[in-house]
Image (cartoon, rainbow, N blue to C red):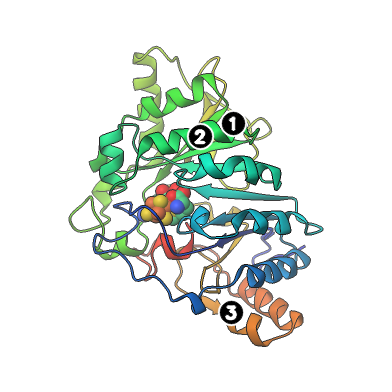
Amino acid sequence: MATDSFGRRIDYLRISLTDRCNLRCVYCMPAKGVTWKPHEEILTLEEVERFAAIAVQEGISKIRLTGGEPLVRKGVVGHVRRLKALTGLEAVALTTNGTLLARYASPLAEAGLARVNISIDSLDPEVFARITRGGRLADVFAGLDAAFEAGMGPVKVNAVVVRSLSQDLVDFARLALDRPVHVRFIEYMPVGGAALGECEPAAEGWTRADHVPADEILERLNSEGAAAGLGNLEAVSREEAPGGWGPARYYRYPGAAGTVGVITPLSHHFCGECNRLRLTADGRLRACLFSDEEIDVRSVLREGSDEDVSAVIRAALAAKPENHSMRIGTTRGMSQIGG
Ligand code: SAM
Ligand code: SF4
């Protein structure tokens, strides 16, 4: 079992499989785009698998593949199958923008992937295209349907709430009425370009004004949900909540098949329960999303022994900060860190 220097159990590894993406969400990537890392700087899938095997020996039991867009990485299905074969690894999950999921859901499910989080920030096709700078909402819904057809679950929808996007939260909540979709509203975070003033929609990047705290999100879901005839939200206990490895709090409208939840990195930070490490696509180990401190694991994977790699993992655990300092801004963007 891996614990950090504050006694927190660290059993969850998020792996960014690529810094590349087929979308350019306004709050995630600057309008001018980002310079992709050269191929030789990106870990090969074999290197990722070797790292994962050693991390599992060090106490990691859950892995989530993210990015950039993980489904643009060639060989992702075989990668999932090989990760799933690691003894001691309980589950492999995926966070995706969903645009390629219609093609991949069935082979991924066959390879052993069940848990999928799909990011959708607007249910209006035109607004969606604007937010993602060209994405097609219909592709994402085809991906959502394909996930259910392939028997995946839990299926979650992640929506980042940004005030100036004026999202209709109840429309999102309706996704959870008939199917066991778990809609999670995420507070907009001051990370990377969003924090450095390079991202829209606020002209100066992330601002307090665009950040909608979870209490307000819940308040709106309650009052607007009741006005729309959905009833009042009921809290879902931890035991009943859709299996999660993170700190979401879940609620349900009466009779709904799924749930709605909030993730509150800023308004109620959950550092005390933080259970994760992150591996960036270019092979840096990052102990905290909000800290720019990273440890190079790529050169160790290329030149060192398994014991050297274990030592890097232990060093990252030792360096994991007790909490994030609410500092506004990280030098690397979400798409590079693997949000
Ligand atoms: N491309 C995949 C996707 O969009 O799901 C995986 C990578 S993306 C960086 C992971 C998650 O980070 C997405 O749900 C996205 O909405 C979220 N994200 C990106 N920038 C964010 C920000 N500034 N604040 C909060 N969430 C953010
Ligand atoms: Fe791509 Fe995901 Fe970032 Fe959107 S949020 S630009 S889909 S990595």
**Separation of disc 1 and disc 3 at Cα?**
36 Å
Rate crowding at label 2 as few (under 14), some (14 to 19) or many (20 or more) other CA atoms within 10 Å: many
Residue sitting at x 53%, y 49%: 95
In which quadrant will I find the N terminus? Answer: bottom right
Tell how many labels.
3
Badge number at residue 144 = 2
Instruction: Tell me the SS state at disc 1.
Output: helix
Instruction: Tell me the SS state at disc 2.
Output: helix
Q: What residue type is labelled 1?
A: Phe
**Separation of disc 2 and disc 1 at Cα?**
7 Å
Task: Check the image and name the residue furthest to the bottom.
Answer: 303
Task: Check the image and name the residue furthest to the right.
Answer: 87
Badge number at residue 298 = 3
> Counting residues from the N terminus, which is met first, the one under dot 1 or under dot 3?
1
Q: Is residue 28 left or right of residue 5?
A: left
Residue sitting at x 29%, y 52%: 26
* 73 in relation to 226, above or below: below
Rate crowding at label 1 as few (under 14), some (14 to 19) or many (20 or more) other CA atoms within 10 Å: some
Q: Nearer the viewer, residue 57 or 318?
A: 57
> Counting residues from the N terminus, which is met first, the one under dot 3 or under dot 2?
2
Which residue is disc 1 drawn over? 148
Q: What residue type is labelled 2?
A: Leu
Q: Position of residue 318 (x, y in %)?
A: 63, 74
Q: Position of residue 326 (x, y in %)?
A: 40, 61
Q: Nearer the viewer, mark 1 or mark 3?
A: 1
Question: Is the Cβ of the residue at disc 2 closer than 8 Å to that at disc 1?
Answer: yes
Q: Position of residue 256 (x, y in %)?
A: 54, 19
